[in-house]
Image (cartoon, rainbow, N blue to C red):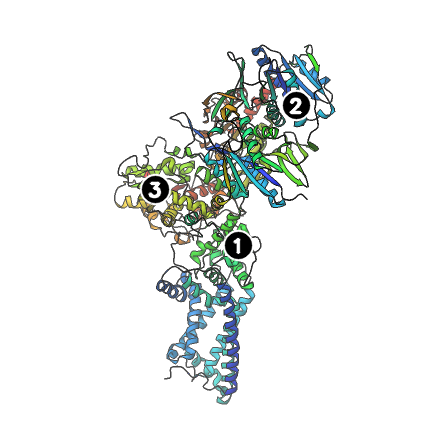
Amino acid sequence: MEIIRDIFQYVPLPFVVAWYTIGVIAAYLFVTGIRRHIRAWRQGKPETISGTPLSRLTRLIYVGIAQARILDKKYNGTVHALISIIGFLLLAGMFFPILQIIVGYLALLFGAGLILLEYKRLRATGPSLETAWEDSFVFGVIVAMAVSGFLMMGVNTWAWPSPAGNALSPIFAPLGPKVLVELYPTLFLIHSALVFSLIAYIPNSRLMHLIASPLNTYYTPITVKGELTTPFDLKQMMETGNFDVKVGATEINDFTWRQKLGFDACTLCVRCSDACPAKASGTKLSPMHLILKLKNLELQAPASGRRLHGDVVDPEELWACTTCRACVQECPVLIQHVEAIYDMRRHLMAEGKVDKKKRDLITFLANVGNTYGLPSADRMKWAEGLDVKLWGEEPNQEFLYWVGCAGSYDTRNQMVSRALVKIMKAARVSFGVLGNDERCNCEVARRVGEEGRFQQTAMELNEMMNKRGVKKIVTQCPHCYNTFKNEYPRFGGKFEVVHHTQLIAKLLLDGKLKLRKDAEKTITFHDPCYLGRYNDEFEAPRAVIRALLPKMLVELPRSRTKSFCCGGGGGNTWYTVELTKKCSVIRLEEARQLAPNILAAACPYCISMFEDAAKILGTSENMPVKDIAELVAEALE
Amino acid sequence: MTSTQKHEGVWVFSESPTVARELLSKGRELSVKLGTHLAAVAFGEDVSEMSKELVAFGADRVYAVQDPSLKTFQVHLYSNALAEMAQTYRPDVVLIGATRSGLELAARLAERLKTGCCTECSKLDVDPDKKCVIVDRLILGGNITETLIIPSKPQVFTLPKGVFQPLSKDPARTGEVVRVQPKIGESPVKVLDRKPKQFAGVRITDAEVIVSFGRGLKKKEDIPIVEELAKTVSGVVGCSRPIAEDLKWLPVDQYVGLSGQKVAPKLYIACGISGQIQHITGIQNARVVVAVNTDSKAPIFEYTDYGIVGDLYKVVPAIAEAFRRHSSGAK
Amino acid sequence: MRNMPNMIVLAKQVFYTQDLRIDRTTKKLKTEGVARVISESDKNAIEEAVRLKEKHGGKITVLTMGPPEAKEALREAIAMGADEGYMLVGPEFENSDAHATAVSLAAGIKKIGQFDMILCGETSEDQYSFQVGPRTAEILNLPQITYAVKITLQDAKVLVDRNLEDCYETVESKLPVFVTVSREINEPRLPTLMAIMAASKKPMTAWTAKNIGLQPGELGRQGSLTEPVRSAVATGERKRVMMEGEPSEAAEKLVTTLVGEGVVKVT
């Protein structure tokens, strides 16, 4: 058997010439099209991609080729895999007879995939995409390509042996060999022309994802999930005195080439927007459309000076983002939506183009070290009457208990702080608090774009805590947890950080806590974004709940990595955006469907948001919101 | 101004006749304690009526300047006139009403006369030993009370309006009216226009009294209960966030809280507001906070000066009624 | 159109008054850990000057008087858009009352040189005396316009809208002029921390009394015209007094208390 098939067997010269002509034109269009994209990417800022080439290559194979993320959705994923992977194999099979045996079967699978796809398209609900007509056209071409392929195989079962061909050939047989010999080259050419047209069309359609998406899965950096990018090094700037840095993205080429590649890799699958809580609550933000706007901009104007904000992107879209990362989680091709949003936020903050509430937020952090603007001297009021020791007041303290702004000042969350103290004392955990030396770690400042304030605070707090011998930190808030664990190390922090649910889970495992079990109540748990999606911690809170109520944990429809954000993150607690229905209300309605006795949470933002929503829906009585710590404290024997 | 020559008399001045009357009452008290006379200063286009009024309300003497240029307050003209008069007649104490105009006048005047001035005094009295006025002022966010005296003469003070009750008018009172003609000069600042303010929509951030409600109020139709109380104290109605943002019973610039308006009124009455932290941060600079709530454990009571545990549907009308009774009593 | 006005802004650094507390144990005012900020209406003045500069060009010089920490105030002002800063610093300036402060600032202004407009806030929120502005204007023999809520520069004069209790007044004055601003005039911009740090590179100069030609007798406590007798802590905390009884009873107690304290004046 030859290695490469002679595809022109049975094809007379004029057809061969035509084939090559069409092929060359298609190749030319393809190459120039791709070059246009590459040119656009390369106008972005430079970037050294972090993550070893080997690990990224593995990811390319797993995510980009094996399409692991796409298969997240069973039906759609399978169909896409059938069509894409098999499509490529078929293309290869055209040239490599070694695949001949399976090509025939592959073709059937391909056809089956198309049928399944059409079935789903007919049954689709919801509004059509803006690209609906173009997509249908492309789909039509693919179907035509498949049909012509089958016909081709049916007409010439010698060149293309296949079960489908065998099944079809009796239809053609009556035409007689002379007709078939003439028919075949035409079909071959038509089929090839359709393939070529698709190839030529790739750079101009959503099919571009065939090239850009796998590339993106290779070039997306491997980083710590919970850590934001660091646009500048404040410490270095203070040392050198050179503050000449452009902060944030104001125009398309302020993004790096890798980010621009990312925008281009969008397949318009809509999974990000479907998962986005900001979109669901009716704000202006739709992650996919934001990415598409950037993608279109980068392709339209290679050396664009066009301003992003106000012209292409509405600042409201940027502020509506709760930074929950559902979009990034869902994206099958690893586009980093949230990172782009942060870059654009940073510019707005650097220009001072933020509304009064955001300015107040930063002013409060600067002046009193908490997000509420309340007196710094009141930070320990929550602990009145509790005999909470300060860090350093007792020898051999194991944990620094970082209470956080909400735990210190918010009357609702002070209850959680007190519960946690009760638990730690019952388990004889030796801990101390910083008391009035504790001030906001400025995670939220970073999220709204005030990077300088964040870095300065990080350096100062790290220095203070390192000097005072802090080694382990337990936080009440997943945002504090994430920032100490994933962001503070870059600025000198050397701590082991646990979230309070992790601590409690460990205490239970070690038998340090005795709980009364209350088997009567059902409980459902809302995974906080910054604990779950950001840090992959789903089990600790569930382990605690199971210790309380062995059988009565019911899962929300959207749980774990698919948890639906409460709407409080990214600074949204401190300012308002226009919306139609709050995320917290949507989530509470979802919980209400399960009719649990308790809605459990593990984050002060979630609790604050849900308490508000409970007042609106009137569920405060029949479905109270409780922190895991409160439930455990109540059940302590 | 050095006190080589004897300074006598407590002078009282305000460009607002109502405030001038209030000042006379406090001025009377000080003049008695200092053993000196009480005089009022009248500026205007036609000062005859004004002078009679000032005498009727307690002035022993009125220094009256009649000039068309003095028809409305202008700091340069008024300070020129008053300074010259003070240099001529050597008052011991000058009390100026702490209206905005009064404040800028007092400061400019005191500097012209190279004498001290204390503004926004919360307490004024006469020191029996030093025989001078001694005052208290709140500084540093109301945390510290500073007690001061002014060694130089005249001692200039500004007094807040609406604090002192005027003496009752006595048309039979007699007093000396002295017509003076100091050099008024020209004002380098020309007034082009004056637009009176309409008080229909007082901004909540400017309000001196705010009556606010939260989810304790069950229906939108019940808002008049709160409005009624607000009316009795010339206050403005405010609310907590859910009322404006979720229920949309009031416009969003009327809700008080962390992400809403931050207010610093003299009096804040919170009706049926639980006192979540977001609301508290909006009112922490209020001088006096009162709360009404059915829940004795409501967090708001941690942040109030005076609280009533009860049903706001009963308590709020009762408070309004009590204010009405006091108001008719005062007359 | 008058271009390039020379503006001097007087800014005072104060403790963030909302964070000042009486320490429960020592019963003294706790200033440790309290942020130092530019007094609110002075910030409005800086912002207004920056807006005028954005419109008309010109130069903004910021002048402050205070402890060495006041340098941060200059940095912040420069980060907002001022061009240079001067500070009057030294023990000789301490314990100045409004008069001594005005004398010092006036001398500083004279040394800075030519100006078209001086701006400052209507009052500082730690002293709340409303005096320094008019006193400084008097010493410099300048026309004063207080409580500005809108400033328009036109050729060699300025048009100002003023916010008085019962009316808005529009006034006009030739330059040079001294203007104090109210908080409603604008919303000050928020410079990022990075911008504030970058501002360290702009010119900032410290002056002593000698630099500005003042004698010790004119400054500080010696130069003041008011004399402090004593200071005491005010109570500060909320009273948390509950009015008991039936609604009408409790309401009566409440109203009597409020009227008696002078919190509310009944009409």
Mark 3 residue type: Met
Q: Name the chain letter of the residue that bears numbered label 1.
A: A
Most extreme residue toward the bottom is A178
Label 1 vs label 3: CA separation?
37 Å
Mark 1 residue type: Thr
Q: Are marks 2 and 1 on the same chain?
A: no
Query: What residue is at 45 percent from the left and 57 percent from the top?
Result: A336
Eyeballing the image, is A476 above or below B52? below
Residue A465 numbered tag: 3
Q: Are marks 2 and 3 on the same chain?
A: no
Label 2 vs label 1: CA separation?
55 Å
Residue holding disc 2:
B16
User: Which quadrant is home to the N terminus of chain C?
Assistant: top right
Nearest the viewer among B10 and C84 is C84
State left or right for residue C83 relative to residue B52.
left
Residue C255 in sight? no
State left or right for residue C23 relative to residue A424.
right
Q: Name the chain letter of the residue that bears numbered label 2.
A: B
Q: Secondary structure at mark 1?
A: loop
State left or right for residue A524 relative to residue C92.
left
